[in-house]
Amino acid sequence: MNTFIPELSEEQLELLPTEEDVAFYERHGWYISPQVLSDEIIDRAIAGSDRFYRGERDAILPVSTGYSNWQPADGCDVVRNNEFVSLQNWELRQLALQPIIGAIAAKLSRTKEIRLLDDQLVYKPPQDLNGKSAVGWHADRAYWSTCSSNNLLTAWIPFHDCDESRGPLVVLDRSHKWSGIENTRFFNNSNLEEMADKFGREGRQVVKVPMTLKKGQVSFHHCWIIHGSYPNRSDSFRLAMAVHLQDEANHYRPFRNSQGREIHIFDEVLCRKLPNGEPDFSDPAVFPVLWSG
């Protein structure tokens, strides 16, 4: 249980978003931080990811299916997508729960508390000349139907410098304000240009913004911003962690799709239940607090 929330240092407080930064995030749907994470923290996470890929686990999830969970049998020269890694590996958990990440997210979403929702460790192999390591356009919120909040957000943390050749995250500027994007779930469609053209034909202004970051920087994006990532055409692998975050007000809500089918997300399986039987999205064992203030 994560009950102790450390305070930020004076130097870290200086790195928090200004009111102008928050206004930019609200208009555009994304924000890039200064270098807020130390090499030591990230290097530990790299060591933790190495252990994770070797099959070492510090804790075991109670359920083994129903979520993205790359295994060596799936092949090494493919995109590796592993969810809920912070619940299984201590070094990756230490990175995901950095208070500075929570404090920045709290500023951007204008909330007093930020909790973990989910996380993903994503590896892209080098020298992808066929574009297979691209991640298709999607909006995170479209996958979180049973969350009540529209202020959820994601911190994207590359483990090294990441320029356009290395396959960074790329967002469609201001797309969080588009209508009719509730079903934008094309994560596995790597044809980014085809889908971007489709968005443009629907009368939207498509402006692609790659999140080119230095090691230690973090990008944040709104839960409704449409985003994907370019293929990794560099000579080095690309390794990054996406930390999905929930604001104080978020809670479970029942949801049915347009066909009337009841929808659930994997998070519900992991957490404790409330007295009324609904999943508790504030369960500290699964959704620890990063920041409260």
Image (tube, rainbow, N blue to C red):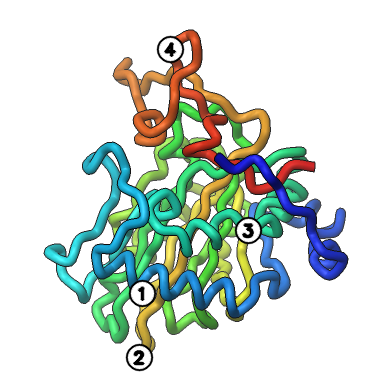
Task: Give the SS element for disc 4.
Answer: loop
Residue that badge 1 annotates: 231
Three-letter amino acid code at the position of disc 2: Asp
Q: Residue at x 76, y 56 (%)?
A: 24
Q: Is residue 266 left or right of residue 288?
A: left
Q: Nearer the viewer, residue 20 or 12?
A: 12
Q: Is residue 126 above or below residue 53?
A: below
Q: Residue at x 67, y 51 (%)?
A: 102
Of the image marks 3 and 2, the number of the one nearer the N terminus: 3
Residue that badge 3 annotates: 98
- For mark 1, does the 10 Å Cα neighbourhood hold few (<14), some (14 to 19), or many (20 or more) residues? many
Work out which quarter of the rendered image holds the C terminus and state it.
Answer: top right
Three-letter amino acid code at the position of disc 4: Gly
- For mark 3, does the 10 Å Cα neighbourhood hold few (<14), some (14 to 19), or many (20 or more) residues? some
Q: In the rendering, at what x and y percent does residue 39 appear?
A: 60, 79
Q: CA distance from mark 4 to mark 3?
A: 31 Å
Q: Residue at x 49, y 56 (%)?
A: 93
Q: In the rendering, at what x and y percent does residue 182 appear?
A: 46, 35
Q: CA distance from mark 3 to mark 1?
A: 28 Å
Three-letter amino acid code at the position of disc 1: Pro
Q: CA distance from mark 1 to mark 4?
A: 43 Å
Q: Quadrant of residue 273?
A: top left
Work out which quarter of the rendered image holds the N terminus and state it.
Answer: top right
Residue that badge 4 annotates: 277
Of the image marks 4 and 2, the number of the one nearer the N terminus: 2
Of the image marks 4 and 3, the number of the one nearer the N terminus: 3
Residue that badge 2 annotates: 235
Q: CA distance from mark 2 to mark 1?
A: 12 Å
Task: Give the SS element for disc 3.
Answer: loop
Q: CA distance from mark 4 to mark 2?
A: 50 Å
Q: In the rendering, at what x and y percent does residue 162 appear?
A: 51, 80
